[in-house]
Image: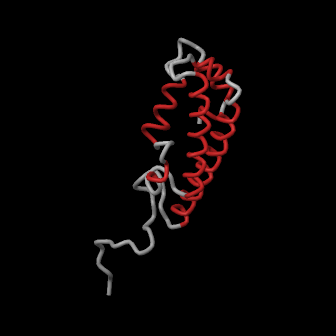
């Protein structure tokens, strides 16, 4: 998650030759992935757990505080220099850690249940219905 990486922010967002910037990341995260002002409605869609909802709300509040103090139209370097920016980075890092852990847990459960990737290489999942007839 780009919001959790100050190095990425400086090297990419502040480079005018790069297509990614803070506005793009915020749009994808808060508009496409989840509404940070009301993340609870995304539980079961893009967010898996109450902890993810809580952490997304915390990230949204931290970013909102910086946005309010820096002016919504300020350049990325103004946001990065804001005294509240380290709170945004820390909140994003904690959220990223929980999201990745939860993704790995879900994938592990699918693997343990017999699902494999790429598709077509998985063994039959337990309880799956097949069209094969049993031999007498």
The image position of residue 61, as x and y in percent, is: 58, 40
Q: Is residue 89 above or below residue 53?
A: above
Q: Residue at x 56, y 45 (%)?
A: 56
Q: Residue at x 51, y 62 (%)?
A: 110
Q: Nearer the viewer, residue 98 or 110?
A: 98
- Quarter of the picture containing the N terminus is top right
Label total for image: 0
The image position of residue 94, as x and y in percent, is: 66, 45
- Quarter of the picture containing the C terminus is bottom left
Seen as rendered, the residue at the extreme bottom is 136
How is colour applied across the structure in the image?
secondary structure
Q: Is residue 106 above or below residue 18?
A: below
Seen as rendered, the residue at the extreme front is 69
Q: Is residue 99 left or right of residue 118?
A: right
The image position of residue 100, as x and y in percent, is: 60, 48
Q: Nearer the viewer, residue 63 or 68?
A: 68
Q: Is residue 16 above or below residue 30?
A: above
Q: Residue at x 32, y 83 (%)?
A: 135
Q: Is residue 121 above or below residue 94?
A: below
Q: Residue at x 49, y 19 (%)?
A: 19
Q: Nearer the viewer, residue 37 or 106?
A: 37
Q: To which quarter of the image does residue 79 belong?
A: top right
Q: To which quarter of the image does residue 31 belong?
A: top left
The image position of residue 9, as x and y in percent, is: 63, 24
């Amino acid at each position: 998650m780009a919001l959790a990486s100050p190095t990425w922010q400086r090297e990419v967002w502040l480079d005018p030759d790069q297509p990614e910037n803070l506005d793009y990341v915020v749009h994808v995260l808060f508009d496409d992935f989840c509404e940070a002002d009301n993340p609870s409605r995304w539980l079961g869609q893009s967010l898996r757990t109450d902890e993810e909802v809580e952490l997304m709300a915390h990230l949204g509040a931290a970013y909102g505080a910086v946005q309010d103090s820096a002016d919504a139209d300020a350049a990325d370097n103004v946001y990065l220099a804001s005294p509240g920016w380290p709170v945004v980075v820390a909140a994003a890092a904690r959220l990223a850690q929980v999201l990745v852990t939860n993704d790995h847990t879900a994938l592990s459960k699918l693997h343990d249940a017999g699902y494999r990737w790429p598709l077509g290489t998985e063994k039959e999942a337990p309880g799956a219905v097949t069209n094969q007839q049993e031999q007498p």
